Amino acid sequence: VQRKPAAAMAPGGDRSQQPLRRTRVVEAKTNKGKRFLEARAPQAIEYVKKLLLVYGQKTSQDVKDVMVDLKHLRDVTECVHLTRKNPGLQPFESGGETSLEFFANKSDCGAFIVGSTSKKRPNNFVMGRMYDEKLYDLMELGVKKYNSGVTSKKIFSPKPCFAFAGNE
């Protein structure tokens, strides 16, 4: 299938005149290639991202309680909780994300939560995702009032969900 050059297209850029491209099926020629393609194929049980819970330089008791409850909502094998304080862990600063990337890669986690407290941002959480062993995106949240609602330590869903409710 050959494509027409851009100059041969209709003046309005009508793409209906262009031939369709078909996706081709890749077939492996060697056993190693077959194993590689089987590993990349859709599977019945997909990979679940593990969650990394990390404390920042200062952490209040409210932040610790929220993080412990988040840990109890996940399965034991799907969550890594590091309880020491980490002074160099600043995801929004340049150069501060390197230690976070190291912790996430070391524990094979695809998502993380950093809990910290400061005078400017009390009870602060930074949630984010990792992609290809690099920091992908970040979200910052603040907690004003927290009541522990986790009474049982049962897992109700392997997929995380956040619900934001309030006037602001």
Image (cartoon, helix red, strand yellow):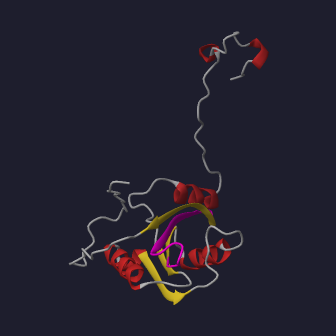
Residues 158 and 57: in front is: 57
Q: Do we see residue 151 in this rendering?
A: yes
Q: Quadrant of residue 85?
A: bottom right
Q: Is residue 10 magenta?
A: no
Residue 22: quarter of image: top right
5 sits left or right of 137 in the view: right
Q: Give the residue displayed 60% in from the left and 23% down from the top.
A: 20
Horizontal and vertical percent position of residue 89: 61, 78
Please tell me which residue lies in front, 126 or 80: 126
Image coordinates for residue 108, horizontal then vertical, percent: 54, 74
Above or below, 67 against 21 in this view is below
Which residues are the magenta region?
A: 116-133
Q: Quadrant of the N terminus?
A: top right
Image point 48% across, 72% down: which residue?
124
Q: Position of residue 109 (x, y in %)?
A: 52, 72
Q: Residue at x 30, y 64 (%)?
A: 157
Answer above or below: position of 130 versus 114. Answer: above
Q: Position of residue 113 (x, y in %)?
A: 48, 72
Residue at (37%, 70%) from the top-left corner?
Answer: 144
